Image: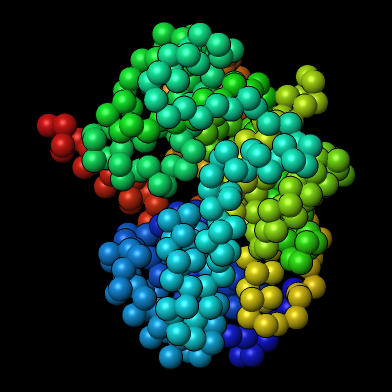
Amino acid sequence: MSSRVSSLPPCIVLGLETQIGLSIVRELGRAGVPVIGIAHEPGAIGLTSRYLSRKLVVNPPRSRELIAAICALGEEFGPCCLLAVSEANLSWLALNRNAFGRVHPVVPTPEKLAIVLDKQRTLQAAREVGIVVPETVEISSMEQANELAVNFRFPAVLKWKDPNAVAQKLSSHGLEMVKAEYVYNSEQFLAAARRYECLAEWPIVQTYCHGRGLGQFFYMRNGQALRRFQHIRVAEWPPEGGFSSVCDSIALDQHLALQEKSIELLRHVDWEGVAMVEYRWDQATNQAVLMEINGRYWGSYPLAFHSHADFALISYYLESGLEMPVLTPLRPPIRCRMMSTEVKRLARIFLHPELIVDRSFKIRKWNEGIRFMGDFFRPRVRYYVWNSLDPLPFFADVRNLFLKFGKRVFQAS
């Protein structure tokens, strides 16, 4: 994809702390877009990318200071768009979308964002278009919890309906945010329910679904999918299920019927822009069960970047009022891995398998070790952070890991 650097307006990227924001910066910079990066932490890995034309650190996040900094960039550079990564930043931008002067945040409306942030509303929308969803129950009292303990078919997974909405409340009561908690019988479920009685708020209860994570990704515009991409998870952190530490892109001629169902779901909620539709796919039965919609750039976005899916570039062009870019073909299937979580995952499997809470997870230590080492020698393997054309973020990531480890050792001593 060619472009004249001098003719392109800049793009602001908010959130450089993770591999997601870093990959967006690299994707835009690779295409010749002047990229202005804003981080909340001075150690953010994206701040060291060679593709940034300007970098800022603004703290606290989601503050008046950040609004002022964004408005100042609009005055300096003229009309430009802003891409954000985290759900917290997207929600804040959506609520303040008219406060940024000449800068246009690329965010859904608060109403549309609320649908995908609320797991119950997402699952209801999926039912309405005929997508299989797990049995899900929302409780509002211990009395209901006691009744459910008698009638529900365990095992189950406990998930928060909207993790962002409850995070501060959990913290104020000294409770950890657990993304997914596995319970195998009524006693375990009631023990977990009693833990949250002080909040008068409980996670939703969902039947456990066997299978692997299957993600389908789309750029939606006026009801049409302008770009498609999909991957299958090879390894996750934590090992029993969470987010991708290793994932493989898969050809678009696979899961075609499911792709069309995913697009129908996104049309049903009137979604615009990037989205990930996530399933648990059981290869034995070929059944896919919806987990959630991520209405943002996802954790494994580096795989999309290395595959030339160009979701961020499409968003930049269209939201900047430019013509739709000519898209290059997707690369043949490749693998992408996140080394920090790969090492953590391997350490848990070999050294602390008792911490793996999903009893159905089959621990195959030597298979995991051989796959881990073999991936270093496979030609079609790429990395979440390491990039030979932009190496400094990798060393910043290593520095941050050592600092984090040192802080834990100091606090423990």
Relative vertical location of residue 235 with respect to residue 259 in this rendering, above or below:
above
Is residue 122 visible in the rendered image? The answer is yes
Asked if residue 89 lies left or right of residue 235, the reply is left
Query: Where's residue 111, x and y in %?
Result: 56, 59
- The structure residue drawn at horizontal position 76% and vertical position 66%, both measured from the top left corner, is 222
Asked if residue 362 lies left or right of residue 334, the reply is left
Query: Where's residue 61, x and y in %?
Result: 33, 63
Outermost front residue: 143
Query: Where's residue 176, x and y in %?
Result: 32, 33
- The structure residue drawn at horizontal position 59% and vertical position 21%, both measured from the top left corner, is 208
Query: Where's residue 410, x and y in %?
Result: 15, 38
Quadrant (top left, top right, bottom left, bottom right) of the C terminus: top left
Work out whether residue 225 or residue 201 is closer to the camera in this orientation and state it: 201
Quadrant (top left, top right, bottom left, bottom right) of the N terminus: bottom right
- The structure residue drawn at horizontal position 44% and vertical position 79%, both measured from the top left corner, is 100
Work out whether residue 212 or residue 161 is closer to the camera in this orientation and state it: 161
Asked if residue 198 lies left or right of residue 364, the reply is left
What colour scheme was applied to this rendering of the protein?
A: rainbow
Asked if residue 128 lies left or right of residue 61, the reply is right
- Tally of numbered discs: 0
Q: Quadrant of residue 75?
A: bottom left
Q: Quadrant of residue 109?
A: bottom right
Is residue 24 visible in the rendered image? The answer is no
Relative vertical location of residue 73 with respect to residue 121 in this rendering, above or below:
below
Q: Quadrant of residue 33?
A: bottom right
Work out whether residue 219 or residue 97 is closer to the camera in this orientation and state it: 97
Relative vertical location of residue 79 with respect to residue 281 in this rendering, above or below:
below
- The structure residue drawn at horizontal position 63% and vertical position 80%, both measured from the top left corner, is 320
Relative vertical location of residue 304 with respect to residue 54 in this rendering, above or below:
above
